[in-house]
Amino acid sequence: MKSHARVVIIGGGMMGVGLLFHLAMEGWDDCVLVEKGELTSGSTWHAAGQCPSFIADYNMAKIHHYSNTLYPKLEEMTGQATGWHGCGGIRFATTPEELDYFRLVEGIAANVGFRMQIIGPEEIRKLNPFVDTTGVIAGAWTLDDGHVDPAGCCNAMAIAARNLGATIIRYNRVTGINPLATGEWEVVTEQGNIVCEHVVNAGGCYAARIGAWVGVNVPIINLKHQYVVTEPIQEFKDRDEEIPVMRDPYSNAYYRQEQSSGLIGIYERRNSREAWVETGGQAWDAESELFAPEFDPIMPWLERVMERMPIFADAGLIRTVNGASPRTPDHNPLIGPAQGLRNFWLSCGASIGIAQGAGAGKYLAQLMVHGETEINMIRVDPRRFGSYAGREYNSAKAHQGYKYMYVLHLPGEERPAGRPARRSPLFNKLKDKGCVHTEVAGWERPKWFSLDGREEEYGFRRNNVFDIVAAECQAVRERVGVRDLSSFAKYDVSGPDAETFLNRLLANRISGRDGGIVLAHGLSETGRIESEFTVTRLASDRYYLLSAAVAEVRDFDLLNQGKSENENVTITNVTEDYGALMVVGPSSRDLLAKITSTELGNDHFPWLTGKEIEVAGVPLRALRINYVGELGWELHMPVAQLESVYDAVWSAGEEFGIADFGSYAVNGLRMEKAYAGWGVELTNEITPIEAGLQRFVKLDKDDFVGRRTLLAREQEGIQWRLVYVEVAAVDADVRGGEPLLKGEKLIGVTTSGGYGHTVKRSLAFAFVKPEFASPGSSFDIEILGERCRSTVLPGPIYDPKNLRLKS
Ligand SMILES: Cc1cc2nc3c(=O)[nH]c(=O)nc-3n(C[C@H](O)[C@H](O)[C@H](O)COP(=O)(O)OP(=O)(O)OC[C@H]3O[C@@H](n4cnc5c(N)ncnc54)[C@H](O)[C@@H]3O)c2cc1C
């Protein structure tokens, strides 16, 4: 057995093998995959093999789509039968909201490149003449997907990987992993040890146990899932064509043809999460494990399937498959670096891993080999979860997601499982005031305030909270608003080399004056945007950094892993130590003047300044910045003092008409100011040049990560540009992923949008080919199936000269 390799992948299921193949395609052939049993003997062999392309997330859809383009070709490439059936799929809509959802996905399909049509019941019955479409108003017909034999497909990728030089060792269990002083890893197996640069945990249901060997929390729960196979059905035998894979919210099921039999999989829905048996403790020697059939929980749903497909009703069952697969709290897989470790990767947590195996492998291979991917991987980055994602949380979320597999999660809808996981001391107080919270990185974050007790009518279009959000925006623009910002990721960076370190790591020049604040981006070696920090210089050797809540773990890694050995710098994650409030609006200075003795005028406390001051008797960090574009301060204080400062702000603000506001309002306000968002506009897909952020990049600095490639990029030119547009929207605003059309030509994609209540305009960000990016350029954005005329704006539509910020 090899004693050295560049990469060791633990686990020979769809995720591990998909990665091995794509690493080999990237030219990394010195890779070894170690599997404790036969390939596919974990969750992969028993899967039903469906590969849906209908996914509402732009980047996840790219992962699925890639798999669906590779699988049909694999048999010819390798000679291994894969059982690919390109029969397509149909998902049912039974409500107008589901139809809107289809329209959203239709736009994503156009951008990603898979064929999808919204069809009516009659057309559905042409494709599946056996289905009863009672209550169905439409179907989302995806034409390029289907189902595959998972074992055949996985083995075909294994053959393709071996053909390119990769090594697969079966019947060899990995029993431990040791970090070596050289920075390499030693993978301990039953057949000997392998020293390698990179380790990948693709252990499926065992991934959490493998992660624990190196102290990595892998937030998965293993859940059972069942499908049944019927006897052959004459009506299927009599046809040449195969019906599409049906996905049906009414029965919470998928059903399709398996040769001439029927195959029915159920996502049973029971009230108690204890109703499922978790299979977290599978024995190491378990191989090709199945569980005894459990009919009771699936029976009511099977009956609904029979209503839909009466030809199934008379067929007996010849097989029941009850197997386990892993699930994460948000149902996206874990693909990317493991927190806190160098060259330790996860490719696990896939609950639809047959559909995702190849795509996940392709993009993770890009990341490992080139340090970047062509898609935005934030939604699958394992570090989107922190230590709050413990067993209880994971379990509650995983069960909820399983139960609602085909139940549309409507915009605005807040599902309760696992909440609250993280909350600021203001949580209950704000809730009592009508606050509706939303969850971000486990945090409960204020979304809007129901002052009259109304409940949001969820949906994709503007709804009954539109006016309330308008009122919150008005308070901020005309009076003063307050908002709990405690979920921000926060770091103290200190030490004699702190300034040099930050200047080397980040693209902007760190302020040279005490109290100076800059916005600074962390770039990859190739100049792409990895992170965005607000950096405040508290003293020459003390800096306070803020970044997005969901970036807390990955930015902590970026800072720690970016530090050179000879740099004397201490980095502390103080996210949970500090609470934060935004006090913002034209009256914010007068308000704060009542509760602080610090001079707040422009001479003493100008825009982009941070100071350690006292407010309401509490020593805190006051930063004159905000994300909504008004005069205002962020107050960051020891978390225990948050409530008393909030109370003081509120009392002092009453005479000015203070109002609470939430993230819905923030979105509209930041859109008016054309503030791009990290993770949506500012992602690893682009450099600051495409984003138009050159003013935050100091190419004249000696050096910083990504500088050289950025210089080259400036010469070469760019393929995309981020633009800020006004949209003639009717009753729904851009959400992200909508196509941009010039005539019938696809010229770009939106990233996010919202309604600017002050300027009374619908606004959006989009990536567009440079020839369409000039101010005044116009095209259509398709929102929920409607083409809306859109025009590129030259700059912020509200206060373009920042006069209000600086007032
Ligand atoms: C009934 C059922 C139907 C399903 N249907 C579908 C479907 O239609 N479409 C779809 O996309 N998904 C489906 N799934 C989900 C799918 O099966 C999984 O998402 C997928 O198989 C996960 O692949 P994986 O490679 O992550 O895990 P696995 O296939 O479990 O692979 C992990 C491998 O790691 C090995 N391993 C673990 N620990 C070690 C160790 N210490 N040393 C060496 N090897 C180790 C295991 O033996 C295993 O082979 C279904 C799941 C179930 C339960």
Image (cartoon, rainbow, N blue to C red):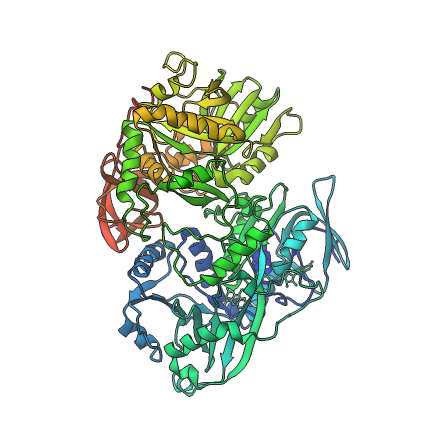
Position above or below: 314 against 45: below
The answer to which quarter of the image holds residue 711 is top left
The front one of 519 and 392 is: 392
Residue 7 visible in this rendered orientation of the protein: no
Give the percent coordinates (x, y) of residue 7. 65, 51
Position above or below: 81 against 184: below
Q: Is residue 664 left or right of residue 202?
A: left
Q: Residue at x 49, y 23 (%)?
A: 621
Q: Residue at x 54, y 26 (%)?
A: 502
The answer to which quarter of the image holds residue 191 is bottom right
Quarter holding ligand 1: bottom right
Q: Is residue 551 left or right of residue 410?
A: right
Q: Is residue 595 left or right of residue 15?
A: left
Give the percent coordinates (x, y) of residue 170. 69, 64
The front one of 452 and 635 is: 452
Residue at the top extreme, as displayed: 603
Assign the N terminus to one quadrant of the image.
bottom right
Residue 790 visible in this rendered orientation of the protein: yes
Give the percent coordinates (x, y) of residue 449. 35, 40
Assign the C terminus to one quadrant of the image.
top left
Q: Is residue 746 left or right of residue 220?
A: left
Give the percent coordinates (x, y) of residue 630. 33, 26
